[in-house]
Structure formats: C-alpha cells, structure tokens
Image: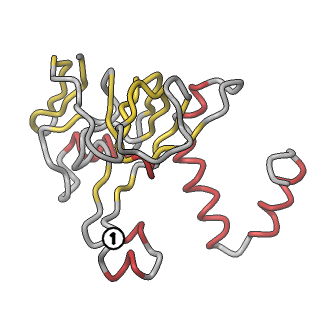
C-alpha cells in the first residue's frame, strides 16, 4: 500500500509499505480522509522529541472498517464509517489510573510514534475507534479530533454553559 512517510527530518515521500496486520482488540481501517495538523509539521521539521522516524504521518483520521479482530468485543461492523481517537494510553500507569489518559506516562500518538493515517490503511485499537454518521461528509470526520480538542479547551476554560447551550441549540446534544 502507499503511504506518506517522513524518513528523515525535512524529507517526506510516498512509499510502498506492507498493509498493517491487526492483532487482538484491533481494527483495520481503510482511510478515506486524514487532515494535516501542526504536529505533522513539527515532526517533519524535527521539532518533536517523542517522534519515532521513519513514520507514516497523520492522526486526524476518518475511514471505513475493513477488518475486525476475531477477539474484539465490539458493536462496530465491517464498512462502518469511523474516526480515530489518536492517543493510545497504557491504561496502567499512575496518570491513567487517575483517569488522565491524555497525560499517560507511556502515551503513543498516531503519526508521531505509531504509524498514522496518511496511508491507504491504518490499524487501531478497538477502544480508540468511534462510529461516525454515514450521512455526514467523511471529510468532516477528519476534523473530529481538532474539534474535540477545542470543545475540551472550552470546558477546561470554564465556558461549559456556553458550549452546552450551543450543542443543545444545534440539536447535537439531548
């Protein structure tokens, strides 16, 4: 399959790489859209100390499930449109035990230290994949992660009432 890979800093290329093989509790996603993030640019320039190159860029991903691990316990099905939560936490460290998975001591991020979505296929843990409505343009699915970051920032910044009113007004929250 084809993938956009940073093989060394300030150098990106389209290369043929093997299609990922899923393991227990993983899904294989046929990527439809992946958006560019500031993190991709920082990685490309060599400004991310946690980056592991060579790496396939991209952590803002929307696609369709192509394969599901036989051991996965999930409500998801083949051909479901999904978005990927790009942070993979260990679920075992002190920060994870406090519910602060985004500050996991062993945090991995798609497109930084795990293979990302600028490829034909990407594999992901089943617990980091969320169904996305088929009736909404999947290009918008690639923006779900930056939207989630913005909404989180509004909540943390103390404007929870404002965002709740907006969601209710737009009929996005019951």
Residue extending farthest right: 169
Q: Residue at x 62, y 73 (%)?
A: 156
> Residue 45 at x, y = what percent?
21, 43
Q: How is the image coloured?
A: secondary structure
> Residue 144 at x, y = what percent?
57, 42
State the image quarter where residue 16 is shown.
top left
**In the rendered image of this protein, does residue 53 appear above or below residue 91?**
above
**In the rendered image of this protein, does residue 39 appear above or below residue 20?**
below
Q: Which of 105 and 73 is in front in this view?
A: 73
Q: Residue at x 52, y 23 (%)?
A: 79
User: Would residue 16 be found to the left or right of residue 67 on screen?
Assistant: left
Q: Quadrant of the N terminus?
A: top left
Q: Badge 1 local density, few (<14 within 10 Å), some, or many (20+)?
A: many
- Check disc 1 and report the residue beneath it: 104
Q: Residue at x 52, y 34 (%)?
A: 142
Residue extending farthest front: 70
Q: Quadrant of the C terminus?
A: bottom right
User: Would residue 75 be found to the left or right of residue 170 on screen?
Assistant: left
Q: Check disc 1 and report its element: helix, strand or loop.
A: loop
């Amino acid at each position: 399959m084809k993938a956009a890979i940073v093989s060394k800093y300030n150098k990106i290329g389209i290369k043929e790489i093997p299609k990922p093989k899923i393991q227990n509790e993983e899904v294989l996603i046929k990527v439809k859209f992946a958006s560019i993030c500031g993190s991709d640019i920082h990685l490309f320039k060599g400004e991310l100390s946690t980056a592991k190159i060579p790496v396939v860029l991209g952590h803002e991903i929307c696609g369709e499930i192509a394969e599901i691990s036989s051991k996965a316990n999930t409500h998801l099905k083949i051909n479901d449109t999904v978005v990927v939560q790009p942070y993979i936490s260990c679920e075992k460290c002190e920060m994870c035990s406090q519910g602060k998975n985004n500050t996991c001591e062993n945090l991995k991020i798609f497109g930084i230290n795990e293979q990302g979505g600028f490829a034909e296929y990407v594999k992901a843990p089943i617990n980091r994949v969320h169904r996305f409505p088929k009736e909404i343009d999947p290009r918008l699915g690639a923006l779900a992660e930056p939207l989630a970051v913005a909404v989180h920032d509004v909540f943390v910044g103390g404007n929870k009432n404002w965002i709740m009113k907006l969601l209710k007004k737009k009929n996005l929250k019951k």
